[in-house]
Amino acid sequence: MAAALKRKSEPELKTYHATVMVTRAEEWCVEAGSPDEARELLAAGLGHRCHLGERIQFEVESVAE
């Protein structure tokens, strides 16, 4: 009986969905002949992510039921 009374006094939880902007510092790798060539290739979107990295900013944009 006490357990039933305790449940009634607790608020009912709902699930909410959010749009979140997350900024990470990632480590990317590319094969190149020089640092300048590597910068150009990375700026062009070439290469691959070596490590996911740490989250450095987290901002909730909107929340909906």
Image (cartoon, rainbow, N blue to C red):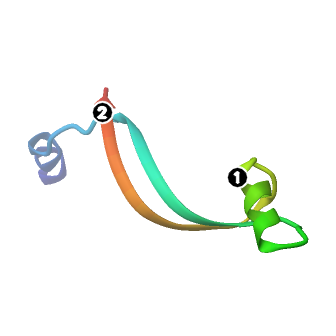
Q: Residue furthest bottom?
A: 34
Q: Residue furthest top?
A: 65
- Which one is nearer the viewer's eye here, 43 or 51? 43
- Which one is nearer the viewer's eye here, 4 or 23? 23
**Percent position of residue 56, x then y:** 42, 64
SS at badge 1: helix
Disc number at residue 63? 2
Label 1 CA crowd tier, 10 Å (few <14, some 14–19, many 20+): few
Amino acid beneath label 2: Val
**Percent position of residue 57, x then y:** 38, 59
Q: Is residue 9 above or below residue 24?
A: above
Image point (79%, 58%), residue name:
48
Q: What's the CA distance linking mark 1 and mark 2?
A: 33 Å
Amino acid beneath label 1: Ala
Does residue 26 appear to the left or right of 56 in the view shown? right
Mark earlier in primary sequence (1, 2): 1
Q: Which residue is mark 1?
A: 43
Label 2 CA crowd tier, 10 Å (few <14, some 14–19, many 20+): few
**Percent position of residue 35, x then y:** 77, 72
Q: Is residue 21 above or below residue 39?
A: above
Does residue 41 appear to the left or right of 9 in the view shown? right
